[in-house]
């Protein structure tokens, strides 16, 4: 769409892909071509007529709440409703973590959930994993724990919006503290915090049933992918859990040659 409007050198710097969250577009525009941002905005609006706001990503996902930095380059309102798998998620990408790119992964997990399961989602964000699971499967209960108060606010609203309050329970706080208050064991535990999941593995020991499934997310360089089963097995063994690795799957990229991986594993034994 920009061909003929800007020189070949500059067109190479324009990102071919961008994320669309509801009616908000998130795009990276390198400094060198910021002077043609209006042309980029115009092209996006021409192709995606429903778009109300365009955010330029100015900093990578960072901090405990895992939020990137953005500047608004078109429109004003940054809150929007994203749709996935028949669910609706009220989010503001400038205040909470939410990634459209993980929607396929959420469906993959939901399809594994058996009728009547008790599911624990640590690091629940605005609730996409708990809510998609509640909508696509028939769990008995899904508990989601989240630290970012703004994400919890959206999580609560999203539970109402998607009419899953009979199944999904929202806990606000640090998983390390909140899990002390939850005296149950779960059939399935999700750990979707790839930057730091390892430091929370010790919590799983008292929360998973023997025979239960854990979905452990982590970042790793492509070169280390083969070693992941051994590495993750050891992390769990060090916390007294004997595990059987069921699957290692790439589910997105984080940086050049560094991917997000999910490791599905079964806890086959727990020792004291
Ligand atoms: C990578 S995001 C994933 C959010 C959500 N599961 C999703 O897929 O959209 C990780 C989330 O964990 C939350 N978090 C970080 N440390 C936490 C902790 N100690 N206890 C609970 N939540 C935490 C962050 O605020 C963030 O929302």
Image (cartoon, helix red, strand yellow):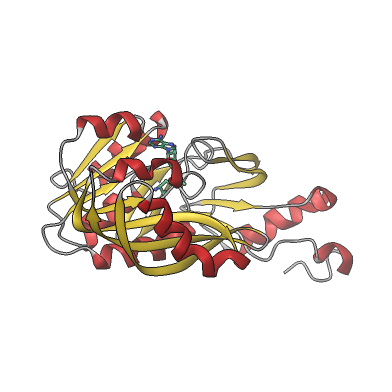
Q: Residue furthest front?
A: 272
Tell whether 100 sits left or right of 137.
right
Ligand 1 sits in quadrant: top left
Tell whether 17 sits left or right of 241.
right
- Residue 203 x/y as whole percent: 31, 40
- Residue 126 x/y as whole percent: 37, 42
Tell whether 262 sits left or right of 59.
left
Residue drawn at point x = 46 percent, y = 57 percent? 100
Q: Give above or below for 48 relative to 81.
A: below
Q: Quadrant of the C terminus?
A: top left
- Residue 62 x/y as whole percent: 58, 39
* Residue 80 visible somewhere in the drawing: no
Q: Give above or below for 247 relative to 24.
A: below
* Residue 253 visible somewhere in the drawing: yes
Which sits in the foreground, 154 or 185? 185
Residue drawn at point x = 62 percent, y = 39 percent? 69
Residue drawn at point x = 52 percent, y = 46 percent? 195
- Residue 189 x/y as whole percent: 28, 51
């Amino acid at each position: 769409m920009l061909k003929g409007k800007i020189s070949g050198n500059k067109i190479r710097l324009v990102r071919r892909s961008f994320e669309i969250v509801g009616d908000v577009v998130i795009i990276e525009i390198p400094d060198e071509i910021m002077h043609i941002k209006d042309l980029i905005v115009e092209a996006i609006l021409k192709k995606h007529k429903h778009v109300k706001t365009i955010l330029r990503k100015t900093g990578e996902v960072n901090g405990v709440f895992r939020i990137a930095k953005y500047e608004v380059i078109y429109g004003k309102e940054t809150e929007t409703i994203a749709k996935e798998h028949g669910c609706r998620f009220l989010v503001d990408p400038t205040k909470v973590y939410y990634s459209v790119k993980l929607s396929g992964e959420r469906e993959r997990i939901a399809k594994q959930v058996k009728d009547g399961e008790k599911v624990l989602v640590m690091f629940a964000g605005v609730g996409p994993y708990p809510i998609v699971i509640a909508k696509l499967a028939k769990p008995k209960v899904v508990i989601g724990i989240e630290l970012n108060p703004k994400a919890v606010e959206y999580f609560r609203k999203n539970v109402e919006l998607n009419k899953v309050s009979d199944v999904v329970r929202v806990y606000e706080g640090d998983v390390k503290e909140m899990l002390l208050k939850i005296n149950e064991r779960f059939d399935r535990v999700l750990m979707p915090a790839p930057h730091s999941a390892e430091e929370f593995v010790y919590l799983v020991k008292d929360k998973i049933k023997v025979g239960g499934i854990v979905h452990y997310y982590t970042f790793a360089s492509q070169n280390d992918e083969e070693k992941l089963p051994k590495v993750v097995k050891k992390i769990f063994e060090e916390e007294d859990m004997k595990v059987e690795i069921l699957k290692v799957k790439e589910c997105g990229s984080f940086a050049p040659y560094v991917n997000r991986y999910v490791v599905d594993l079964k806890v086959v034994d727990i020792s004291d």
